[in-house]
Image (spheres, grey):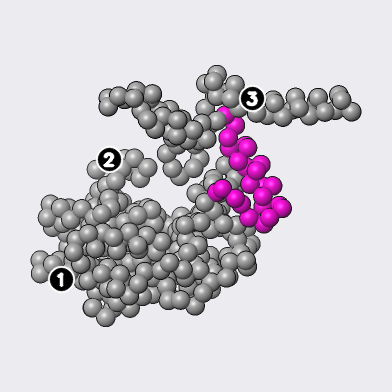
Amino acid sequence: MKKLKLAFIMIVLAALLVPSVLMFCGYKNANRENRVLAKLPKLFTEEGFNTRFAAQFDKYVDDNYALREYVVTAFNAADIALLKDVNGTNAVIGKDHNIFYGETVEDYLGINGLTEEQINTIADYLSDMRNKLEERGMQFAFMTAPNKATVYPELMPSYLRPTDAPRNIDLLREALIARGVDYIDAKAILLEAKKRRSVYYRHDSHWNNYGAMLVYNAIAERFGLEVRDPDLYETVTDRMGDLHNFVYPSTDYPEERIIYPKLHSYTSARPINFDRDKTVETESGANSISLLFYHDSFGRSLQPILSEGVGSLFMTSYFPYDTSYIDERSPDAVLIELVERNLDKLYEHAASLGF
């Protein structure tokens, strides 16, 4: 019995020490998460002694200890097997192998939503932007990218029980339509399309390329671009989801990715890398239309489709929106895309401007 206890103690000690020893020896984990990992802090900075060193070092170790991806995967797999969900990870395990982003749960439940006054603040801000652009002969449209849980509520775990409170995405749509602001209703488009085929990835928070093409067609109809056939495509199975890497960072779960035939060739000012660049600029021979596109991560899958369909495309993911690009580029049209879960940030921006 003593030998068994001793063996158990040695195994536990080894499990605790091995990551630290490997980390000290220079072992580097592969970063498969959609975020920048904490860097080793300095004890002294230009301002002097770093009073936040201990907290920053703790975060650094938590992000970078050796074999972290294997430990996280094993821990989360055990959580899912025993509790049907995960703790300490910004993800929610849904039905039929779906994973949802944890930050969208409040929207799904209908709690802590924006007030009518706050919705009106956003709508007034966007209406004012529309008016100023139209005075300069520019078209404008706004689009809310729905959270995956908004399109697939039936796949959320049954222990989450949504309220019947009105949702931010619906309230804003109504407020913008009442003000005559062009609103591209991606939610309605995707809810209808999911009857035919999937429009979001299972292990990702974003719409897939099929959903992106349907949204593009709505944009094309609004701005006079060429509409595409969403059902003409090939597929490969190589898409790795952002939420999969939250939950199972040491494993692969390749999903089907749609590839559409090229409509028009385009060139970019520099090689496109959304992880590095906040702006992307492309040119094509599709037409003479120029489009300024303010977007978040949902805009990434729209980039190649828009680049093939727009003569001159300038995309920026800066937020708050840098309107100096409008003066610099004088586009024919301006489009804003913002994910549903970040509508509160748009309210804060609009309120800071006095709307």
Q: Provide the major secondary structure of the magenta segment.
A: helix
Left or right of 11: which side holds 75?
left
Q: Which mark lies nearer to you, 2 or 3?
A: 3
- Residue furthest toward the bottom? 178
Mark closest to the chain's N terminus, 1 or 2: 1
Q: What residue sits 51% from the left and 65% below the top? A: 149
Secondary structure of the residue carrying tag 1 is helix
Mark closest to the chain's N terminus, 3 or 1: 3
Relative to 51, is 325 above or below?
A: below
Q: What residue sits 30% from the left and 69% below the top? A: 118
Give the camera-side residue of 40 and 58.
58
The residue beneath circle 1 is: 131
Mark 3–mark 1 Cα distance, whole angstroms, equals 63 Å
Whole-percent x, y for residue 78 in the image: 69, 47
Label 2 neighbourhood size at 10 Å, few (<14), some (14-19), many (20+)? few
Whole-percent x, y for residue 87 in the image: 60, 50
Please state, as top left, top right, bottom left or bottom right, where the N terminus lies in the image. Answer: top right
Give the camera-side residue of 315 and 311.
315
Secondary structure of the residue carrying tag 3 is helix
Which amino acid type corresponds to the residue marked 3 in the rendered image? Leu
Left or right of 249: which side holds 114?
left
Please state, as top left, top right, bottom left or bottom right, where the C terminus lies in the image. Answer: bottom left
The residue beneath circle 3 is: 17
Whole-percent x, y for residue 221 in the image: 30, 71
Contact between labelled residues 1 and 3, with CB atoms less than 8 Å apart: no
- Residue furthest toward the right? 1
Magenta span covers which residues?
Answer: 66-89
